[in-house]
Image (tube, grey):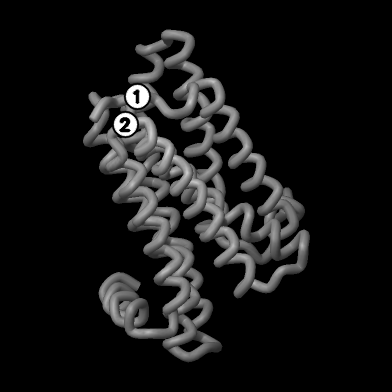
Amino acid sequence: MKQSKSIPLSNLSLIFTTILLIIILGFYQTYLVFFPKFQGFHYEQHFHGFMMILWMVFLIIQPLLISNKKYQIHRFIGKLSLIIAPLLILSIFLVSKMVYHRSIATLSQQESLASIVLGLPNMFAFILLYYLAIFNTRNMPAHMRYMIGTALLMIGPGLGRLLITGLKWPLEMAVPAVNYLTIALALVFLVNDIRKKIDYLPYLVVFITLVALQVFWQFRFSEIWQVPAKAFADLLF
């Protein structure tokens, strides 16, 4: 199959900017409004928020650098991502650990393990998609698609909070709605690549990864999630 770019670079930066705005709006009522004192918040939350925003800024800048032929700066930021991505992964881990210990103090272990279903699966999904993006650095179309996958992972935290705080949706409605939206976006990209006879493996991986996130959420109180989550928590939390 041939390789091609399915989304113009200028449009790609616009999409990433939109996702960043969703993140900022989503975290406004639950986090940013408490600036500058941030009473009641922990360092893990500040670290995680900063790393998420920094990652999205990287994603916004990179397509613009390519379209303007600033390849040297693009490569430098790409190398810098080898530091930033692990720090983002660490921030997700630390927030998940914080949420688990906060929950275990008042909830059952089953409920506490269910409470980290929005963190740990996303962490492993990000690790997978980022690794595949780096592995395909010399294959720009595949590299771009996996990076788009990492951006789709960022929609959930922002849009989910926006639905909960803005539209007063319950968590049980907001999370599946966001999951199905990101799955639908990945499916549109996948079908477009198939239709154009472009190598569709990257978007297929992204699609399956996003579906897996919804599966874990749907069965967060069953053994599908509880068993691996307990093993992980016992080992590292």
Left or right, 233 with respect to 189, comes to left
Residue 72 to residue 142: above or below: above
Point 48% across, 69% down: residue = 98
Q: Quadrant of residue 31?
A: bottom right
Of 127 and 106, the residue lying toward us: 127
Please rate how many residues cluster around mark 1, counting C-alpha atoms within 10 Å: few if below 14, some from 14 to 19, many from 20: some
Residue 9 to residue 42: above or below: above
- Which amino acid, mark 1? Ser
Q: Quadrant of residue 201?
A: top left
Left or right, 38 with respect to 44, comes to right
Residue matched to label 2? 198
- Indicate the secondary structure of the residue bearing disc 1: loop
- Indicate the secondary structure of the residue bearing disc 2: loop
The picture places residue 177, in percent across and down from the top left corner, at 59, 63
Of 141 and 56, the residue lying toward us: 141
Tell me, yes or no, whether the two marked residues, 1 and 2, touch with CB atoms within 8 Å.
yes
Residue matched to label 1? 4
